[in-house]
Structure formats: structure tokens, C-alpha cells
Image (cartoon, rainbow, N blue to C red):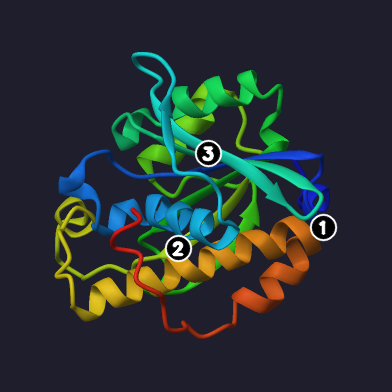
Amino acid sequence: MADGVWQDGAPGDKVLIAGLGNPGRRYAFTRHNAGFIALAALRQRLQLPPFRECGVSGASADRTSGTVGEHAVVLLRPLELMNLSGQPVARELRRQMLTPEDLIVVHDDLDLPAGRLRLRVGGGTGGHNGLQSIVEALGSAGFARVRIGIGRIPGRSSADYVLEELAPEGEAMETLLSAAEEAAEAIEVLLSKGLSVAQQIFHTKPTTETSDLRSTV
């Protein structure tokens, strides 16, 4: 899919927004769960109903829905492990009668400095197992992505780093929560004003203070 599909906002009347992470309290506040945390922030911003579990074995997820301006939105958090995210997303796209062009995936990115955002449409997976699973399940990489930078520490295992439980009052936690808040705001701009405007705002915007999302994730 060309970037032009999203230049003026969402390409259709309905959009599926999938946030990636691992299920369970053990992973709730790890860097790898940035997508889950961003969707919690978006649900809070839009005052949507609580997430409810849906799906079937092997494709389970939790979901809520509502509207952003003129667009119907479905928020989905796959409840399979990260590297099995594809089937829940593919199942929900079919259920909603949508295509990959109607999908936004929100995920962590080791190759971006912590707290920075990048928005794009299409492209590679950058070694992200959740993204790879979605591409394989859909047979397409042509969906929009909101990438939340988590940085990396040279010499440290990436797996240990992304799955580290963050201290509740630590700087890393505050950076993650702030970035999640900005990602939620960026999604609203992407839907209403399009990719170029969202990139102009959020590719250079400094991280802001966050509300407390700990009880909403």
C-alpha cells in the first residue's frame, strides 16, 4: 500500500487499531507492551467502554469500540504471545470486513530512542516478532504503524531489555507512559488529518507529561 492512502486521514469509515504486547500482569509494564499501554491511553482519551475479551483459542484478544470524529474505530489487543499476534488481528479484520489498508498497528521499536514516535505505512518488520506474525497472517505489510521508541542498551540482550519489569516510579516507566500518551494523540491526528500532518507534528514533538495509566492497562 502506498503512503498516499493515508495522506488525508483514514481511508475508510472504519479502522482497526491493534496494540501489540504480551498478556498477563507479568508483562504489563515492560517496554515490549508499549502497544498495549498506548491503546489503554487511547481508550481513556476517547472515553470508550472497557476492553472485553473476544476471539477463539489461538486467536484470542480483548476489544472495545467507538468513534473518532467521523470514523468508527475498533481497538484490539491480541492476548496470544507477541509472536502469535497475527491470527487475532487477521480474525478481527475479517470479522469487521476490513482490509490491511484499514489497519493501524501500534508497537515498540528498539531502533528508535526511548520516547520518540515514528509513523509510517508499509515497510519491513525490523525484526519485531509481533509485526512479522501480522505480515505473515495477512499476506501483506501494507498497514499503518505507530512506532514507539524504547531505545536499546549496547551489549545487553534485547529479549531481557524489552521484557524487563520497569520500576513504578522510575524514569524508564515515565518515559514509556509519556510516549504511550503521545501515541494515542498521534493516532487521533492520523485518523483525522492524515499521515503527513501527523508526521510533521509527532516526529519532532518532545515527550510531554503523562496522566497515570497504571490502573488502566
- Kindly indicate whether the residue at mark 2 contacts the one at mark 3 (C-beta within 8 angstroms): no
Residue 107 locus on image (x, y percent)? 44, 52
The answer to which quarter of the image holds residue 156 is bottom left
Q: Residues within 10 Å of mark 3 (few under 14, many from 20)?
A: some
Q: Which is nearer the eye, 191 or 48?
A: 48
Q: Which is nearer the eye, 128 or 187?
A: 187
Residue 92 locus on image (x, y percent)? 56, 25
- Amino acid type, label 1: Gln
Q: Which mark is residue 64?
A: 3
SS for tag 2? strand
Q: Is residue 129 above or below residue 67?
A: above
Question: In the rendered view, does 97 fall on the left or right side of 30?
Answer: right
Question: In the rendered view, does 22 fall on the left or right side of 186?
Answer: left
Residue displayed at 20% across by 70% down: 154
Quickly name the residue at label 2: 148
Q: Which is nearer the eye, 171 or 70?
A: 70
Quickly name the residue at label 1: 7
Q: Quadrant of the N terminus?
A: top right
Residue displayed at 25% across by 51% down: 28
Is any part of residue 64 visible from this angle?
yes
Question: In the rendered view, does 143 fall on the left or right side of 81?
Answer: right
- Kindly indicate whether the residue at mark 3 contacts the one at mark 1 (C-beta within 8 angstroms): no
- Amino acid type, label 2: Ile
Residue displayed at 45% across by 44% down: 50
CA separation, marks 3 and 2?
Answer: 22 Å
- Amino acid type, label 3: Thr
Labels 1 and 3: the sequence-earlier one: 1
